[in-house]
Image (cartoon, rainbow, N blue to C red):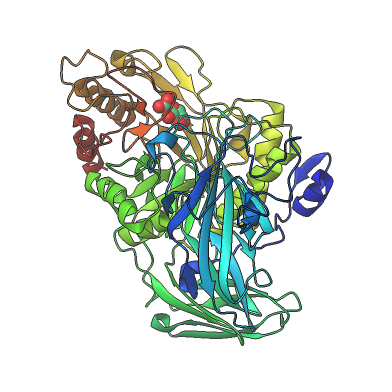
């Protein structure tokens, strides 16, 4: 399997694995919300199975009679030791931790079952689509395994055309959120390990030959040429495709090749093209019509590139007024999955004067990205290659690559996504450099219209001459780094004494800075954990930037909202939360929120 996986997922070049394509057996459907779907969200029965009794027999071998069979017995002639019909129900999507507090710290397997009716329409194909499930998922339909997925924050789907029956269907899903050292992320990360089916579940209908992927965006470096790519999936790959952008008076006909692929350049009248910007997040209706399918999307057009140490949006220098965001709901703190809850967090960022959000440390749900696009918020999107990844393990690389591929494929038509981030705070080393540089090369090959970055760590020249020195600097477009002077490194007064020497002629972003404060804990500015101390840390950091880092291109302080983390145990201060938010977990704005808001007004 491992060799097959590598062959499927990569080409071994000079001993390095660098995947040309990561397509599994089920290519990811794009823009599923633009298709006919049967929404399978709702109340699902569930069974908590810490010993995976529903999967293994008593000799720890996968059992053919597992819970996924959901056999109906009369308990006289045959017995079973599980029952979904009488099992409790849980609203899906939604993490199990905050929906059943007996499962708050549970890490293991939960089985979910959804029974649904289906009218078999012979000439259509059907895909089961999951927005995400954390962390390892196996999907069964009517007692048969349709597929499995590893990774807790990216979409996946399986074709189920031949698994569906007319009438009643049983969908059973095994989700296991156990952390593992050889996973992505590893078993060590500073956010809460919410488990379960955490995003939408859809049964997607598609024609026998459908539009699998498309990418429509201004060509790199051009403001009057749209570059398009459309890929068909099915038994009629050779088709005429019409791409319409009515508002731009564009109607372009192209023909796909034997692989179902068509690429084209289309001149656009730049006099009528309203470029997407944070101030004017203009989206255009784009119709993509093949002989057997049609899909509609709302796409913004803009160019993003770097020139020396500047980031250029539509050819103009851009300063990223940002904040880092975890995908955790305001107030209730569970995993976010809806547009409504996404808008609350994004609304706080807008209120603070942001034009940018760093969606850390994993791809957020599609609604978060689409709502940010409508609100004029640029996005940094990141895969959870976080801290001490097993750099030498090819399966770990394949996993990271697959999550990267799924992230790009889902959001490659979102104008506001300008940065793909391939890592956060990873320790320097040859194996890490090979792993990450291959991810960077893959990203460049898959999408040359966006910028690549990663959150690096400091490599100081002395305790007060701070610097960045990272072999990965040649592979990224933007040098981003996390620094915690005033919190992990000295107290606030140190911010007045440090200076920076960063010798790269590339744009620089401070991707994290900050300190913890308990909302409502007021006191002297010298007292850590008070709002005053956090506010002064922000004020001194921003002053340091104004005085000694005038050339940087942006910031995304850590973090918008206090978030749950099982690493944060200090009683009466943290109580299971990382308190670096400028907003508390209950939605209260701390003093630092207003310090940052005032500074953004000067930018
Ligand atoms: C790191 C890391 C974050 C973490 C933060 C902190 O920079 O990237 O994930 O939460 O520091 O220590 O609060």
Is 295 situated above or below 47? below
What residue is shown at x 61% (from left), y 59% (from top)? 72
Q: Please provide percent x and percent y for residue 488.
A: 40, 17
Taking the image as shown, residue 523 lies to the left or right of residue 171, namely left
Taking the image as shown, residue 284 lies to the left or right of residue 294, namely left
In terms of image quadrants, where is residue 534?
Answer: top left
Comparing 564 with 349, the one in front is: 564
Residue 216 appears in the picture as rendered = no
Is 582 situated above or below 147? above
What residue is shown at x 51% (from left), y 68% (from top)? 116
Q: Please provide percent x and percent y for residue 516.
A: 31, 24
Residue 110 appears in the picture as rendered = yes
Is 533 situated above or below 232? above
- Residue reaching furthest to the front: 76
Comparing 591 with 114, the one in front is: 114
What residue is shown at x 42% (from left), y 84% (from top)? 246
Ligand 1: give its quadrant: top left
Q: Please provide percent x and percent y for residue 46.
A: 49, 49
Is 50 situated above or below 242? above
Taking the image as shown, residue 370 lies to the left or right of residue 185, namely left
Q: Please provide percent x and percent y for residue 252.
A: 55, 84
Which quarter of the figure is the C terminus placed in?
top left
Label tally: 0
Comparing 425 with 388, the one in front is: 388
């Amino acid at each position: 399997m491992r060799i097959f996986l590598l062959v499927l997922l990569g080409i071994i070049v000079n001993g390095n694995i660098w995947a040309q394509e990561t397509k599994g057996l089920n290519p990811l459907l794009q823009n599923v919300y633009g298709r006919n779907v049967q929404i399978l969200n709702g109340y699902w029965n569930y069974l908590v199975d810490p010993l995976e009794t529903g999967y293994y027999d008593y000799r720890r071998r996968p059992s053919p009679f597992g819970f996924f069979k959901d056999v109906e017995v009369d308990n006289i002639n045959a017995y079973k030791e599980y029952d979904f019909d009488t099992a409790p129900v849980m609203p899906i999507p939604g993490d199990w931790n905050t929906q059943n507090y007996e499962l708050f710290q549970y890490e293991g397997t939960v089985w979910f079952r959804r029974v649904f009716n289906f009218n078999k329409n012979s000439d259509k194909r059907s895909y089961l689509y999951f927005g995400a499930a954390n962390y390892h998922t196996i999907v069964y339909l009517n007692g048969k395994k349709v597929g499995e997925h590893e990774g807790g924050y990216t979409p996946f789907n399986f074709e189920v055309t031949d698994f569906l029956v007319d009438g009643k269907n049983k969908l059973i899903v095994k989700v296991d959120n156990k952390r593992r050292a050889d996973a992505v992320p590893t078993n060590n990360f500073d956010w809460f390990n919410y488990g379960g089916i955490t995003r939408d579940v859809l049964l997607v209908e598609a024609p026998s030959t459908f539009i699998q992927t498309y990418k429509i965006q201004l060509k790199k470096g051009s403001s009057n040429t749209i570059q398009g790519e459309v890929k068909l999936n099915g038994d009629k790959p050779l088709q005429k495709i019409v791409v319409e952008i009515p508002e731009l008076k564009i109607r372009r006909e192209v023909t796909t090749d034997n692989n179902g692929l068509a690429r084209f350049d289309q001149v656009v009248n730049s006099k009528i093209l309203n470029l997407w910007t944070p101030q004017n997040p203009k989206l255009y209706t784009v119709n993509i019509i093949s002989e057997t399918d049609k899909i509609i999307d709302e796409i913004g057009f803009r160019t993003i590139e770097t020139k020396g140490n500047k980031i250029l949006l539509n050819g103009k220098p851009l300063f990223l007024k940002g904040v880092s965001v975890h995908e955790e709901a305001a107030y209730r703190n569970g995993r976010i999955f809806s547009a409504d809850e996404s808008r609350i967090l994004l609304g706080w960022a807008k209120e603070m004067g942001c034009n940018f959000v760093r969606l850390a440390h994993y791809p957020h749900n599609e609604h978060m990205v689409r709502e940010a696009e409508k609100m004029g918020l640029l996005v940094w999107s990141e895969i959870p290659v976080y801290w001490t990844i097993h750099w030498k393990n090819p399966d770990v690389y394949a996993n990271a690559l697959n999550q990267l591929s799924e992230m790009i494929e889902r959001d490659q038509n979102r104008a506001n996504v300008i940065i793909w981030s391939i890592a956060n705070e990873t320790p320097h080393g040859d194996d890490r450099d090979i792993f990450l540089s291959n991810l960077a090369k893959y990203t460049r090959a898959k999408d040359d219209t966006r910028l690549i970055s990663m959150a690096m760590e400091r490599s100081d020249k002395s305790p007060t001459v701070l610097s960045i020195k990272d072999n990965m600097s040649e592979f990224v477009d933007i040098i981003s780094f996390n620094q915690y002077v005033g919190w992990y490194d000295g107290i606030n007064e140190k911010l007045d004494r440090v200076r920076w020497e960063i010798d790269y002629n590339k744009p620089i972003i401070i991707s994290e800075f900050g300190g913890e404060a308990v909302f409502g804990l007021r006191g002297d500015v010298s007292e850590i954990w008070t709002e005053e101390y956090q506010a002064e840390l922000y004020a001194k950091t921003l002053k340091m930037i104004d005085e000694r880092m005038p050339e940087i291109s942006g910031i995304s302080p850590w973090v918008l909202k206090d978030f749950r983390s099982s690493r944060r145990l200090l009683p009466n201060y943290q109580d299971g939360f990382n308190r670096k938010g400028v907003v508390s977990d209950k939605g209260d704005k701390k003093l630092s929120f207003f310090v940052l808001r005032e500074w953004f007004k000067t930018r």
